[in-house]
């Protein structure tokens, strides 16, 4: 089965005995939101860069020109870290969206929001409006990047976010990219996907986004295409960035019949 091959490829480097899951909560559903597996799915907590999915949705909903070149204000890079070279003057809105989803670039997400009609405040207001429209009643955003620990949600709400994100081809296209390359004069700068699963095998990936700040722990959301149907997986509050992906792999294995230690 295609699902089995995909999962076995992802977990090849793991030991055969599952390790305890450190994540505070997780949820697996189908593409209708029907629950398959869950733990503390209503637990509300910081969500870090998972936030950027909503930022991308708001920009796309506004039908802003993805080819428009946006000026880069690197004074903001002191707050919103980026590896982009300071010699860059502009990037297209589409390139910034790719960087926000693939590399989880905070400066890219901020720049998208700063160039939203009405600016950052209006962008954040629309993010919260979209959350309510999507039935994400335990979700609240205070910034477009996820650096602010008061960006809050829970696994049940984030499944809804993932499903909304999946309706945007620009997000699904970015989610499956192992890397984004930006040309600066004669040099290419490569920005790798923060989700190592996408870098290994992106064939079944529909939506992917990772996140981490101290307040949130390791977070990851994915929507996978499988022989059993589409499967949304949300994992929040893992111990760190090194544990979130192995734990998501273990949960993925559970969906196809493997054991999982839920303690």
Image (spheres, helix red, strand yellow):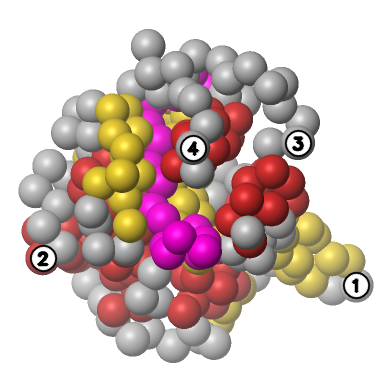
Cβ atoms under marks 3 and 4 closer than 8 Å: no
Q: Give the position of the C terminus as an image quadrant.
A: top left
CA–CA distance in space, label 2 to label 1: 45 Å
Cβ atoms under marks 1 and 3 closer than 8 Å: no
Q: Which mark is residue 186?
A: 1
Q: Secondary structure at mark 2?
A: helix
Q: Is residue 116 above or below residue 248?
A: below
Q: Secondary structure at mark 1?
A: loop
Q: Is residue 100 visible?
A: no
**Image depth: mark 3 or mark 2 in front:** 3
CA–CA distance in space, label 1 to label 3: 38 Å
In this figure, what is the number of numbered marks?
Answer: 4
Q: Which residue is mark 4?
A: 257
Q: Which residue is mark 2?
A: 133
Q: Which mark is residue 12?
A: 3
Q: Position of residue 66 (x, y in %)?
A: 49, 83
Q: Position of residue 197 (x, y in %)?
A: 65, 47
CA–CA distance in space, label 3 to label 2: 40 Å
**Image depth: mark 2 or mark 4 in front:** 4
Residue name at image x 49 percent, y 37 percent: 257
Q: Is residue 219 visible?
A: yes
Q: Is residue 173 left or right of residue 62?
A: right
């Amino acid at each position: 089965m295609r699902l089995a091959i995909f999962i076995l490829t992802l977990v090849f480097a793991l030991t055969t005995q599952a390790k305890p899951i450190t994540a505070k909560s997780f949820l697996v559903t189908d593409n209708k939101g029907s629950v398959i597996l869950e733990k503390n799915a209503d637990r509300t907590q910081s969500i870090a860069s998972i936030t950027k999915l909503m930022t991308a949705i708001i920009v796309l909903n506004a039908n802003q020109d993805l080819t428009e070149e946006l000026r880069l204000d690197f004074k903001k890079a002191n707050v919103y870290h980026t590896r982009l070279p300071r010699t860059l003057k502009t990037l297209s809105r589409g390139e910034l969206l790719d960087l926000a989803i693939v590399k989880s670039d905070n400066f890219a997400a901020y720049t998208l929001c700063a160039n939203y009609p009405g600016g950052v405040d209006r962008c954040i207001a629309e993010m919260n409006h979209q959350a309510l429209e999507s039935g994400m009643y335990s979700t609240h955003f205070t910034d477009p990047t996820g650096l602010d620990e008061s960006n809050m949600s829970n696994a049940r709400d984030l499944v809804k976010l993932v499903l909304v994100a999946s309706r945007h081809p620009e997000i699904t296209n970015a989610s499956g990219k192992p890397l984004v390359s930006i040309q600066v004069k004669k040099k290419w700068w490569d920005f790798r996907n923060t989700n190592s699963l996408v870098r290994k095998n992106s064939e079944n990936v529909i939506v992917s986004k990772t996140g981490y700040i101290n307040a949130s722990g390791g977070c990851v959301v994915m929507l996978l295409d499988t022989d059993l149907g589409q499967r949304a997986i949300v994992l929040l509050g893992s111990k760190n960035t090194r544990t979130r992906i192995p734990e998501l792999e273990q949960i993925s294995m559970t969906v196809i019949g493997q054991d999982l230690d839920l303690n």
